[in-house]
C-alpha cells in the first residue's frame, strides 16, 4: 500500500512539474534584447561614400564660373522629362516625371549632351563629378559639378512592424536607421538572424547581422547602400504558431491538468483507505 501511495505521489509531482514548465509565462528569452555584448568596443566609424551602381538615378547640376550660366543650362535637366533611354541630344532621361536627372544604364554609363557617354557605375559621386568637370572644360568656363542621388532606397522584409520600401533623404544611412523606419522588429523577429543582400557587379553578396553583438557596427553591411535588401527571420515561436495546431497548447495543458488531478485523487483515496 505504501508503495502505491509513493508511486501516486511521485506521478502527481512529475505531472505538476511538467505543467508548470510548459507555462510560456515562465520562460525568459535572453536573446530578445539588442547590444548585449561588445559595447566597450565601439570605435569611431568612418563614413564611406557609396559607389554608384547600374540603374541609379542621379541629378547633375552644372554651374559656370562666370556670368554666362546659359553655357551650363544644357546639362541641367528640368522636371517633366518622361522618356527613358537616350534622347536626340544624347541625354539619358528619367522615366519618372517628378524626377529630373540621369539614370545610369545597364552598362554603367550615363550620356550627357555634347560630351557623350561617361562611365558612372563603380565611382563615388565626387569621382564622377571630377570626371564630368574634366570633360566640360571646353564647354563651360570653370565648371562646378554637383551630383546627388535622386533616390536612396532599401527594401526590408520579414519580422518588422512596417515591411516595405524605405526611402531616405540622405545616402548616409545604416542598418539601424532602416530597422527604426520599419518600426523595429516584432516580438517574433530573430535578433541574431538579420540577412542583408547587396548587388555588387551583378552578383548578390550576403551578410548576416546579429543585433545582440555590437561588432556588427564593423560589418560592411552596417552602412547601407542603394537597393539593399534586408530580411528579418522568424523565431521558433512564430514558426510554431504557423505550423502547429493552434489548439495544441490548450489541449496539452488540459490533458496534463487532468492527469495530475487524477493521480492526486487516487493518492488521496489510497491514504484515506489506509
Image (cartoon, rainbow, N blue to C red):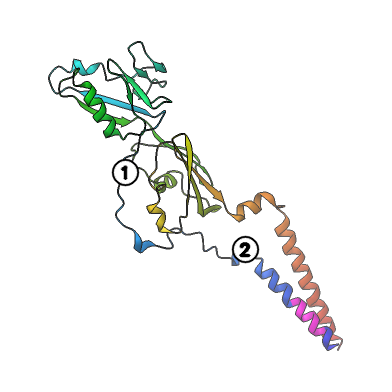
Residue corresponding to mark 1: 48
Pick out the residue farthest to the left. Answer: 67
Under tag 2, what secondary structure? helix
Quadrant hosting residue 39: bottom left
**Distance between mark 2 and mark 1 Cα atoms:** 45 Å
Residue 68 within the segment the image draws in magenta: no
Q: Residues within 10 Å of mark 2 (few under 14, many from 20)?
A: few
Mark 1, Cα crowd under 10 Å, few <14 / some 14-19 / many 20+, is few
Is residue 174 visible in the rendered structure shown here?
A: yes
Q: Main secondary structure of the magenta part?
A: helix
Residue 213 location (% of width, % of height): 44, 59
Q: How many discs appear?
A: 2
Front-most of 104 and 81? 104
Residue 103 visible in image = no
| Residue pictured at 65% horizontal, 54% vertical | 240
Residue at x-position 41% and y-position 36% = 153
Q: Between residues 242 and 58, which one lies in front from this camera angle?
A: 58
Check the image and report above or below for 250 versus 203. Answer: below
- Residue 9, by quadrant, is bottom right
Q: Residue at x 71, y 73 (%)?
A: 16
Please report whichever mark, 2 or 1, sits nearer to the chain's N-terminal start: 2
x and y, in percent, of residue 8 in the image? 80, 80
Q: Which residue is mark 2?
A: 24
Q: Point out the image quarter for the N terminus.
A: bottom right
- Which stretch did the figure color magenta? 5-12
Amino acid at each position: 500500500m505504501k508503495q502505491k501511495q509513493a508511486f501516486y505521489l511521485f506521478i502527481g509531482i512529475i505531472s505538476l512539474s511538467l505543467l508548470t514548465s510548459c507555462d510560456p509565462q515562465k520562460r525568459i528569452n535572453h536573446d530578445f534584447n539588442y547590444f548585449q555584448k561588445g559595447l566597450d568596443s565601439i570605435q569611431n566609424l568612418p563614413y564611406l561614400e557609396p559607389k554608384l551602381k547600374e540603374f541609379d538615378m542621379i541629378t547633375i547640376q552644372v554651374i559656370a564660373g562666370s556670368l554666362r550660366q546659359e553655357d551650363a543650362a544644357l546639362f541641367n535637366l528640368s522636371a517633366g522629362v518622361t522618356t527613358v533611354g537616350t534622347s536626340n541630344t544624347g541625354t539619358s532621361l528619367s522615366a519618372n516625371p517628378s524626377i529630373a536627372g540621369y539614370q545610369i544604364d545597364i552598362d554603367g554609363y550615363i550620356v550627357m549632351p555634347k560630351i557623350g557617354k561617361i562611365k558612372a557605375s563603380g565611382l563615388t559621386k565626387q569621382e564622377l563629378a571630377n570626371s564630368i568637370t574634366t570633360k566640360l572644360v571646353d564647354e563651360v568656363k570653370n565648371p562646378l559639378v554637383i551630383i546627388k542621388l535622386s533616390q536612396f532606397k532599401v527594401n526590408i522584409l520579414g519580422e518588422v512592424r512596417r515591411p516595405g520600401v524605405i526611402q531616405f533623404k540622405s545616402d548616409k544611412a545604416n542598418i539601424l536607421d532602416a530597422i527604426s523606419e520599419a518600426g523595429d522588429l516584432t516580438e517574433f523577429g530573430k535578433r541574431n538572424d538579420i540577412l542583408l543582400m547587396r548587388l555588387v557587379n551583378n552578383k548578390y553578396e550576403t551578410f548576416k547581422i546579429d543585433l545582440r553583438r555590437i561588432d556588427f557596427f564593423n560589418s560592411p553591411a552596417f552602412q547601407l547602400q542603394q537597393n539593399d535588401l534586408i530580411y528579418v527571420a522568424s523565431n521558433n515561436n512564430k514558426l510554431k504558431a504557423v505550423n502547429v495546431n493552434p489548439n495544441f497548447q490548450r489541449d496539452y495543458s488540459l490533458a496534463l491538468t487532468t492527469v495530475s488531478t487524477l493521480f492526486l485523487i487516487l493518492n488521496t483515496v489510497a491514504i484515506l483507505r489506509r
